[in-house]
Image (cartoon, grey):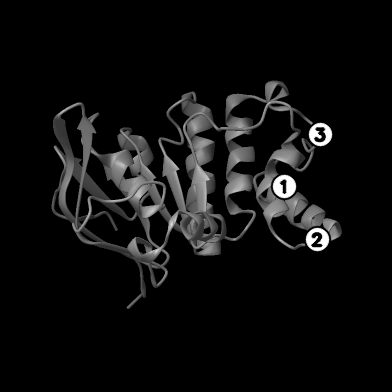
Amino acid sequence: MSNTIVSVQNVSKSYQRGAQKIPVLEKISLSVPEGEFLTLMGPSGSGKTTLLNLIAGIDRPDTGSGSITVANTDLNQLNESALANWRSRHVGFIFQFYNLMPVLTAFENVELPLLLTKLPKSKRREHVRAALDMVGLGDRVKHYPNQLSGGQQQRVAIARAIITDPTIIVADEPTGDLDKDSAGEILTLLARLNSEFKKTIIMVTHDPRAAEKAHVVRHLDKGVLEDINHKK
């Protein structure tokens, strides 16, 4: 039985809009084993990205509404500074629109997270080249984002996400801005990270084809997590 890497227990999340309180998630409980590839699906506004952000420590649940534990760390117990430090070490982020720095090369974009570590420059270069080779872009190290296709930019973003060897990878609509062929390549790469490198991946998507790569699909509807659906 795999160790549980993510444990969400009885968590709710709402936002304040003026005097009105808008509920987004209601008493969510979710357990993710180490090495799982989990997809969160649901209509727009169902709370998928909010749940992903809570797990990644980008956002916090409502006060007193439950607990989120990732890699044996209770995120509720961390202050903002400690939480930022925890994110940098444990979470690899992949976004729909890549979030690359346009003035930096592919190499420099991937290296960014390592600048916060104590790794010497020679080791940083080694790690970056290995990561770019792994995503099939070893020959694009000096290219800037505007010299790369959308699929290539997303692969740079994936290399950046894995460069620190994070505990979990969170992907928010990683194929949402890509054509069908590029999307397929990205999904194959994510599946490889999961199967070969045993990376735990939590992915938000609205695309059933993207969900096909996951082991487990969970559906959110109006802030409520539906019953588990094991795919394989």
The amino acid sitting under disc 3 is: Lys
Quarter of the rendering containing residue 155: top right
Relative placement, left or right, of 81 versus 205 is right
Residue 210 placed where, x, y %?
A: 38, 39
Nearer the N terminus, badge 1 or badge 2? 1
Q: Are marks 1 and 3 in contact (CB under 8 Å)?
A: no
Q: Which residue is mark 1?
A: 111
Residue 182's x, y, as percent? 53, 30
Q: Quadrant of residue 175?
A: top left
Mark 2 packing: few (<14 Cα in 10 Å), some, or many (20+)?
few
What is the CA distance from the residue labelled 3 to the residue labelled 2?
18 Å
- Quarter of the image with the N terminus is bottom left
- Sequence-first disc among 3 and 2: 2
Residue type at the position of mark 1: Glu
Find the residue positioned furthest to the right: 122
Horizontal and vertical percent position of residue 152:
63, 32
Secondary element under disc 3, as helix, strand or loop, is loop
Q: Nearer the viewer, residue 134 or 85?
A: 85
Q: Which mark is residue 123?
A: 2
Quadrant of the image for the C terminus?
bottom left
Question: Which is more foreground, mark 3 or mark 2?
Answer: 2
Query: Label 1 vs label 3: CA separation?
Result: 12 Å
Residue pointed to by mark 3: 142
